[in-house]
Structure formats: C-alpha cells, structure tokens
Amino acid sequence: MAVALVLAVLLGWWHGRDDGSLQRIRESGVLRIGYAVEAPYAYLSGSGEVIGESPATARLIAAAMGVERLEWVLVPFSHLIADLQEGRFDLIAAGLFITEERGSQVRFSSPVLAIRSGVLLRRGEQESLRERLLTAMPVSLAVVEGAVEHQWAWLRPEFRPGLVVVPDALSGQVAVASREVDALALSWPATRLMAAAAPATFEAMLLPGAGETVNLTAFAFRPRDLSLQQAWERAQRQVIGSSAHLAAIAPYGFTQVDLAAGKETAD
C-alpha cells in the first residue's frame, strides 16, 4: 500500500506539473505555427497572407487563449513533424490527419474535421480510372510525401510501380496536367477545390477503395508540451462549431457536416 501511495503521488505530480510550454507562450506573447501548403487547409493568398481552414481555425483558438501574435513557419509537408520536434514552431496547423504512427511522435488535439480521400484526374477520364483502380490494373499515381494517401498506395503492391512521390499538392497537380501521372491521390476537399478552379482541365472523385475511409484532422504539439496542448484544448472546445468558426471556414468549402464531432475513422 505504501508503494502504491508513493506511485499515486508521483503520477499526480507528473500530470499536474508545469512543463513550461504554456508559460513560454505567455511570456513571449508569440505562438509559432508550422504549416505546409495544401489548399484548402493552409496556403498563401495573392498578398502573401497565410489562409485556409487550419489557419482560420487556429486564429480563433489562439484569440480565445488570449494570444494575439502568431508567427507562421512554412515547411514541406514531410518536414512538419520533424521540425515541430526540433522546436522550429510550437504546433502544426495544416489539416494533419491523425494516424497511429504520427500519434507516437506528436500530441494531437481533439479532432477538428472528418475527411475522406479523393483523386484529381484529367477531365473525361473518370470512368476509365475508376475501373483501373478497382481492378488493380496499371495506374500511375502521384501522392504527397508523408500524406495518408502515400501510405495507402504504398501498402498496395499493384500501385507501387507507378507511384510518384511529390513534395506538395501543386507539384501533383502539375504532374496530372502534364500527363506525367494518371491522377493525384489526396484529400477529397483538396482535390475537389483543384478541380473546381480549373474545370476544363480537371475533375475529382472519391478515391475508389479508400473513399469511404474517414480521416480525422487535428492540431499537433510536441508530446512534452502538455500545458500548452491542454490550454489549446480548452479554447478549441469553445471555438469548434461556433458561429464564428463556421463563418471562418466557409470560404474554404467547409460546413458543419465536415466537423469531426461524433464521427470515427473507418477501415
């Protein structure tokens, strides 16, 4: 019983201790946020402003925390977690999907969105591509390095020979337009937005064989930054689903039905 009591006290101290992460933000008044370019989650406006669903949501949450100054750090998508761990920024706001592998490296917030995977392809080729994907016929797919669609395609040997790994969504879009690949596999909102921007060139569809899988997005923190993540979590609960939040994400094609509340991932 004595040993159990000591362990209970130690665990209580561990979970209640101040790790300094929130205090650091309060003292500096600055929250550094890492992002990668992938519309509609995070990208740059024509004037150079960081916009998108994730930055819009992050600004509301930071304001609810009382943090007025945000510094945005642009990195390649595949560098987000490594650069977070190295201290280049305090959190990731990039529509990052929750996966078991990532969960072993970062501390996620509660889920924000529930998203399915899609495909960007050249107009008029949808039926042919759908059949080839479903019957494991030869297909060349572009995937963004580190994205969940990269993992999905790599786990299917029939797609590996034609797999082209690109650093970002724009590179994948260019690869489709130039016929370097048959399609770009990426999140459904991202592919849908690309197709809507150039309807004479592209169209989009849910990724056959993976389109029913629901991926949850979240903000990500260093595992040791518990006090910062907890403060963010409290503010996030006030923001997500509010009228101000829905108005902020509406320009990027998201509505209340895209929110993660009450939804779970499916295999």
Image (cartoon, grey):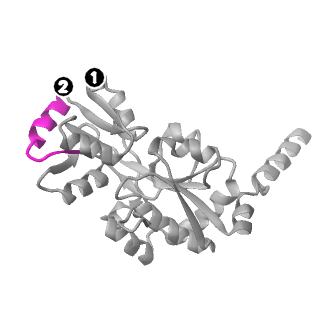
Determine the CA span between mark 2 and mark 1: 8 Å
Of mark 2 and mark 1, the one earlier in the sequence is: 2
Residue 237 is situated, as x and y percent measured from the top left of the image, at 54, 67
Q: Residue at x 87, y 45 (%)?
A: 5
Q: Residues within 10 Å of mark 2 (few under 14, many from 20)?
A: some
Toward the viewer: 267 or 102?
102
For mark 1, what is the residue? 161
For the point 58% across and 38% down, the residue is 104
Would residue 128 be counted in the magenta stretch? yes
Which kind of residue does numbered mark 1 sit on? Pro
Mark number, residue 138: 2
Which element is circle 1 on?
helix
- Where disc 2 sits, the SS reads loop
Examine the image and state in which quarter residue 244 appears.
bottom left
- Mark 1 neighbour density, 10 Å: few (under 14) some (14–19) many (20 or more): few
Residue 213 part of the magenta-drawn span? no
* Image point (19%, 32%), residue name: 133
For the question of whether residue 207 can be seen, the reply is no
- Farthest right residue? 2
The reply, left or right, for residue 199 in relation to residue 28 is left
Quick check: marks 2 and 1 in contact, CB under 8 Å?
yes
Residue 259 in percent (x, y) is at: 39, 61
Task: Judge whether residue 46 can be spotted in this image.
Answer: yes
Q: Which residues are magenta?
A: 120-137
